[in-house]
Amino acid sequence: MPTVSEPDGAASAARVPLPACFDLLGRALAERGLFVEIAAGDGAATILRFEWGPVDGSPGVVVREVPFAEILGPASAEAAAELGLADRWLDDAVGLTAAPRDTEALFQAAGTYPPTSRPGLRVLVAPAPYLEAMRRIARGDVP
């Protein structure tokens, strides 16, 4: 099972399974009323925030590309503190600024978190066309 290292990077029995990290992050986001997708691929990750509107004929969902610090930063820091992880655990796991360290681990941990209640996070490994399409939707570049 894919894991995340302790702050000092030491390999030990205290390594935390990546799905447990994502689960805690997803719960923190859901508690804030957020649903965020991290789509990793193409050498880096894209962070998208989905906002659902009323079901009265108005647009059903708005997709926005957001910077890490705006939404994920606080929730990621909470997860790091609770689990004893390095501050960069999420960047290392999904490749927010560079390719993820272990793409196979990320592929295995992809999913919606938490899986048993209202989700706040979806993590996926996406091909370049998906990433480009979602970026265009977020910028409003599509009719």
Image (cartoon, rainbow, N blue to C red):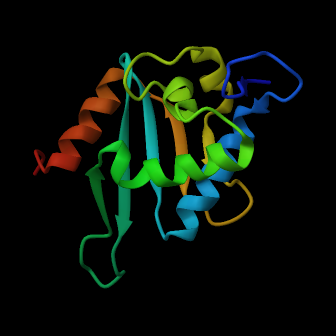
- The residue under the point 54% across, 39% down is 123
Horizontal and vertical percent for residue 100? Answer: 50, 18
Horizontal and vertical percent for residue 38? Answer: 45, 40
Residue 33 vs 97, above or below: the answer is below
Residue 10 vs 80, above or below: the answer is above
Quadrant in the picture for residue 21: top right
Quadrant in the picture for residue 51: bottom left
| Viewer-side residue, 102 vs 125 | 102
Is residue 80 in view?
yes
Residue 48 vs 89, above or below: the answer is below
- The residue under the point 53% across, 24% down is 92
Please indicate whether residue 96 sits to the left or right of residue 20 in the image.
Answer: left
Is residue 113 in view?
no
Residue 7 vs 9, above or below: the answer is below
| Image quarter of the N terminus | top right
- The residue under the point 72% across, 28% down is 6
Please indicate whether residue 11 sits to the left or right of residue 91 in the image.
Answer: right
| Viewer-side residue, 113 vs 133 | 113
